[in-house]
Image (cartoon, helix red, strand yellow):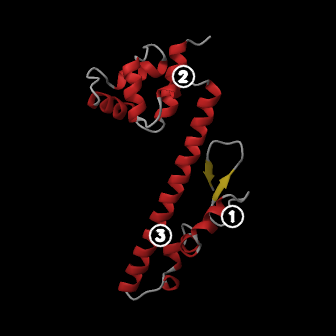
Amino acid sequence: MTTRDEEIGRAVRSIRGDMPQATLAAAMVDEGHEKWSQSTVWSIEKGTRPLRFSEAESLAFILKTSVDEFSMDTDRQTIRFLLGDVSSRASDLGFAAVKLEAARERTRRYLDSVGKSFDELPEALLENGPYKQWFEMSVPEIAAAALEPDGGKVGFRYEPGTPDTTYL
């Protein structure tokens, strides 16, 4: 049987998301909770140290949530965590798309500066990866291919029920 402090600790962990415990502790110190450290966050999340109301108010401010979120039921915590994971992955995908386009542009500019085109590059330079495909495919095409059962043209395979992808 779980204690109320353990339930609150799980809620704090879920709401904290990817923020490191040390970062949260430093923010709490900035809010006037001088004795907070990474181990304080760990103890609260584990349920071995109770969360004081004044601390909950500061945590809610830092984590951009409300105090009542720390006391919601486990199903809501799980759903919130999963939705946060989806949001985080979507942000990662968007950031990766921007970085991909920047890398492509740097490659185009460099090739232009040395008077070469992608098609003129020696095969030996391109043999260790699907570089040409990644260079030519649009971001939506790469994302769609990654979701194909065989990994499509990009060499990734998503298998429903697994926590992540595998690289072929």
Dividing the picture into quarters, in which one does residue 75 lie?
top right
Q: In terms of depth relative to the viewer, which is nearer, 33 or 17? A: 33
Task: Mark 2 and mark 3 in contact? Answer it, CB < 8 Å.
Answer: no
Query: Closer to us: mark 2 or mark 3?
Result: 2
Outermost bottom residue: 115
Q: Which residue shows up at 55% across the image and 19% down it? A: 7
Specify the amino acid type for callout 1. Gly
The residue that label 1 is drawn on is 152
Picture layout, residue 119 above or below residue 41? below
Mark identifier at residue 73: none
Q: CA distance from mark 2 to mark 3?
A: 43 Å
Q: Residue at x 47, y 34 (%)?
A: 65
Q: Which residue is mark 3?
A: 101
Please name the residue that numbered disc 2 is placed on: 71
Q: CA distance from mark 1 to mark 3?
A: 20 Å
Q: Amino acid at mark 3?
A: Glu
Question: The residue tagged with tag 2: helix, strand or loop?
Answer: helix
Q: Tag 3 or tag 2, which sits nearer the N-term? A: 2
Q: Secondary structure at mark 3?
A: helix
Q: CA distance from mark 2 to mark 1?
A: 44 Å
Q: Give the farthest residue toward the right.
A: 149
